[in-house]
Image (tube, grey):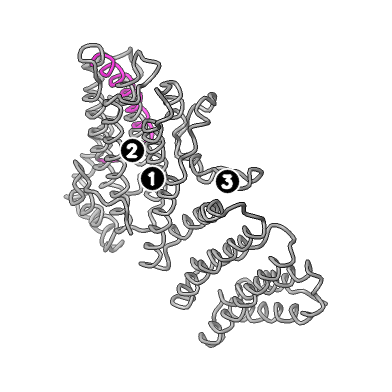
Amino acid sequence: PRIFSRSIGQISTDTIITPILLIMHGQNRAEYKARFNDEKTSSLLKQKAKQWYALSEEILSRRRGPTESVVKIEETLKLTEKLLAVNPDPTHLWNHRRELLLQLYDTKAEHDLRSTGTSCKVANEFIDQERGLTSTSLQRNPKAYGAWFHRKWSIRHWLQLELNVVCDGETRIQNDDSRFGDICIEWEKKATEELELCSQFLILDERNFHCWNYRRFMVSVMAFILQTKESLDSKDKVNLDVKRFTSLLAKLDGSWLWANNCFDKEKENIVMGSQLSCDNSSHEADNLTMLGEEQREFLIKNEWNFTFEKIQQNFSNCSAFHYRSKLLPLMLNYQYRKLDMPSQTQLDELKLSLAQDELELVQNAIFTEPDDQTAWWYHRFVIFWSKPSYLDGTALEAYVELLDYEIESIKELINTEGGKCKWGFLAQHMLITEMKSTLSLLDLGEEYNNLNAEANQCLEKLILLDPVRKKRYSSMIQHE
């Protein structure tokens, strides 16, 4: 079920999605290029290019000049908006825009705070303006690196501006501070809108990795918001340290620190990489980086269900499979922590159980589209991920049973495809090799002396099916 399902608010999905559809789908490359041969069209494009470069030079000359006044800054921002709406790719324009925004809106927020006691109006003006610009830019190019990055930066800076509303001049926030509660509600609403917008984008282009990255970033933003609400609602605290909140927000870079409560501290690592630079010099917010169990489960399970939905819609969705591979250890962690006094044996059992569920999903994919490598990649990942980390005889035997079952399933698929399934033979070779390696740990290698022969037979078939890689397969053949 899709949990984040609210409306997009001020952003109209019709105005965003329809132009993207025209840009991304249903175009013939030859027809697209042919329009440039038209003299009228070519002349118009040249004229536009001259105007664009003239404006670009004007902006650069202003940047090289002395510090601009507020009026001049606003004029320059309008110029960058015009240029980026036409061509959202130049990184230097986005960089310059951010420099100007930092000068303008930090000054505006400070002025509003002194005159009215709040900077909410300025913060909302900022985020609405930047979301509008990036939306327009993404209509022009849905895979513009600069536009997606700027949207992430804008979200974080907006949170910083709004946090100033309750933090300016104060060192503590009272639990009953209604301003902070209202801001948290607004934060959650906008974060939900952004996640729903990602869902709409991925309906049109399910492999747009920029959008997948942005979704992961917004999940980390939602985690920060839920952390903030948890801290505010905590009954065992009379007030909250402002410095700790600002430190936590400064660390908001898109990496999933909130999900890093691993069952094995020695293997603790960052689940998702950072997407924005951040201040890592302070460790004052370290104790706030962990969400409560319920909230962490909510976010992880929602993303888990989302990837399942996208895979069911299209088994070739490599982006969804990749995301699921990152979520799989988190699902294991979630189930493991539910156990009372869990042991290593129980961890291995849970891992194999999860792997079996995932392999069932993969079986549906590879039997439907056996020539698509996407599901085969995930199949290989799950096989190696599910291998017991400790040399426990019982766990290894269960792993051998899983391998044996997969070998038989792949054989059935190969037979169904008339012995012409390249990816099936590759998977079978991988499974047999892994079986041989695991049996050697159990000192049962002698019982499977024919495994080498079976593995070599797979390679011989691959040489016939895929002669381009003949030398590679030949080098993999094991001689007695």
* First-in-chain label (3 vs 1): 1
Amino acid at the residue labelled 2: Arg
**Gap in angstroms between the C-alphas marked 2 and 1:** 9 Å
Where's the N terminus, which quadrant?
A: bottom left
Amino acid at the residue labelled 3: Cys
The residue beneath circle 1 is: 214
- Prevailing secondary structure class for the magenta stretch in the rendered image: helix
The residue beneath circle 3 is: 262
| Residue beneath the point at 66% across and 69% down | 399
Other residues around mark 1 within 10 Å, as few (<14) / some (14–19) / many (≥20): many
Instruction: Find residue 436 and report its horizontal and vertical position in percent.
Output: 74, 72
Q: Is residue 25 above or below residue 126?
A: below
Q: In the image, which residues are magenta? A: 86-112
Q: Is residue 477 above or below residue 132?
A: below
Relative to the observer, which residue lies in front, 403 or 153? 403
| Residue beneath the point at 75% across and 71% down | 439
